[in-house]
């Protein structure tokens, strides 16, 4: 990937896309193509075809897609399934037709079985029943992972790279409590409780499930590393994780302290927990020479600062 290579970052305004854009620019890649959803609807095949024909990108990072937490997944399963599969299919076909050198696709840890042995190895995919609360989204991600493998196999070239990061967090995340993942949701809940001087924050589930988190800029770094080392990759997906997991209770306590919320926490056990534990075994990728560099608390402090600017100052919450 030369400094002058044309690189298309799909979803450049989102959590991972913005981190990737920052990473590429810091390394001197200047020929970067971006389009917001307003100007390029990736779910429409004819629009995607026209874009690839006109722009002829050499490298594609497919960060675009629809994501959300338990509530969003339970409420809009058809939307999650259709949107993600449509985007993947359109971009994959266009990448093949217009000779993209490498395309990076991102899976999700929810693609693995609910009761997977821990830590989760890549070969555990499709070995058991997936978590029901994220079933539709997980199926779409599984389809994308298998599509990468199928395209590489049929066309005898490992041009489709599938990376599977665990739960990401960082600047430019979605902080809508009804649609976001656990970290941005907790940040917003604790901040609003602090501003309103509330004494209690009620959170879903028991707080006992354990999760591994990885900072978005670390995943961006892993993405660039993967393309630079593409010839060393096998035709399979690669786990990308931090190697450390936390209970949701531990996470809530860390975030409440960072935010400065002084009240208590109650757990609504009538609400779903999701999978009991999701810790990835990232040995294969780590053995290639990459490693994450951002500890959880450091990343959370940066993310909270971003929330204050993104949602509070501009949005008028403070």
Image (cartoon, rainbow, N blue to C red):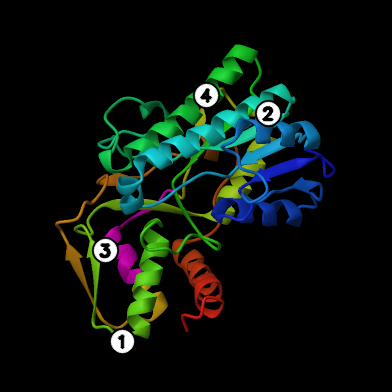
Up the image or down, 194 lies above or below 132; here it is below
Counting from the top left corner in percent of width and height, residue 139 is at 39, 32
Sequence-first disc among 2 and 4: 2
Q: Which residue is mark 4?
A: 147
First along the sequence among labels 3 and 2: 2
- Identify the residue position indicated by label 1 in the image: 197
Q: Residue at x 45, y 64 (%)?
A: 175
Sequence-wise, the earlier of marks 4 and 3 is: 4
Bounds of the magenta segment = 243-254
Residue 120 visible in rendering: no
The alpha-carbon separation of the residues under discs 4 and 1 comes to: 50 Å
Residue 30 is left or right of residue 151, and the answer is right
Q: Is residue 259 left or right of residue 277?
A: right
- Marking on residue 249: 3
Q: Are marks 4 and 3 in contact (CB under 8 Å)?
A: no
The foreground one among 93 and 30 is: 93
Q: Which residue is mark 2?
A: 95
| Residue depicted at x 56% and y 75% | 309
Residue 66 place in picture, x, y as percent: 48, 46
Question: Is residue 318 found inside the magenta-colored segment of the image?
Answer: no
Residue 313 versus residue 264: which sits nearer the camera?
313
Where residue 303 appears, as percent x and y from the top left, is 51, 67
């Amino acid at each position: 990937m030369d400094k002058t290579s044309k690189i298309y970052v799909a979803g450049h305004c989102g959590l991972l896309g913005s981190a990737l854009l920052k990473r590429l620019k810091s390394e001197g890649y200047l020929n970067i193509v971006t389009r917001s959803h307003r100007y390029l609807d990736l779910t429409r095949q004819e629009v995607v075809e026209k874009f690839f024909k006109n722009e002829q990108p050499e490298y594609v990072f497919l960060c675009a897609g629809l994501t959300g937490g338990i509530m969003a997944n339970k409420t809009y399963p058809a939307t999650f399934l259709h949107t993600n599969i449509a985007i993947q299919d359109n971009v994959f076909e266009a990448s093949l037709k217009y000779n993209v050198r490498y395309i990076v696709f991102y899976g999700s840890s929810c693609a693995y079985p609910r009761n997977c042995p821990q830590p989760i190895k890549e070969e555990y995919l499709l070995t058991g029943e997936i978590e029901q609360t994220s079933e539709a989204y997980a199926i779409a991600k599984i389809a994308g992972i298998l599509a990468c493998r199928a395209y590489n196999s049929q066309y005898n070239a490992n041009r489709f790279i599938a990376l599977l990061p665990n739960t990401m967090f960082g600047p430019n995340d979605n902080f809508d409590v009804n649609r976001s993942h656990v970290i941005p949701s907790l940040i917003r809940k604790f901040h609003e409780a602090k501003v309103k001087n509330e004494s209690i924050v009620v959170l879903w589930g028991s707080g006992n499930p354990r999760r591994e988190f990885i900072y978005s800029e670390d995943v961006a770094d892993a993405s660039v590393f993967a393309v630079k080392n593409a010839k060393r990759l096998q035709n399979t997906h690669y786990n990308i994780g931090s190697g450390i997991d936390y209970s949701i209770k531990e996470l809530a306590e860390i975030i409440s302290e960072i935010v400065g919320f002084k009240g208590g926490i109650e757990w609504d056990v009538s609400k779903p927990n999701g999978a009991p534990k999701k810790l990835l075994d990232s040995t294969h990728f780590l053995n290639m020479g990459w490693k994450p560099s951002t500890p959880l608390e450091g990343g959370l402090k940066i993310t909270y600062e971003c929330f204050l600017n993104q949602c509070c100052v501009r949005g008028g919450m403070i």
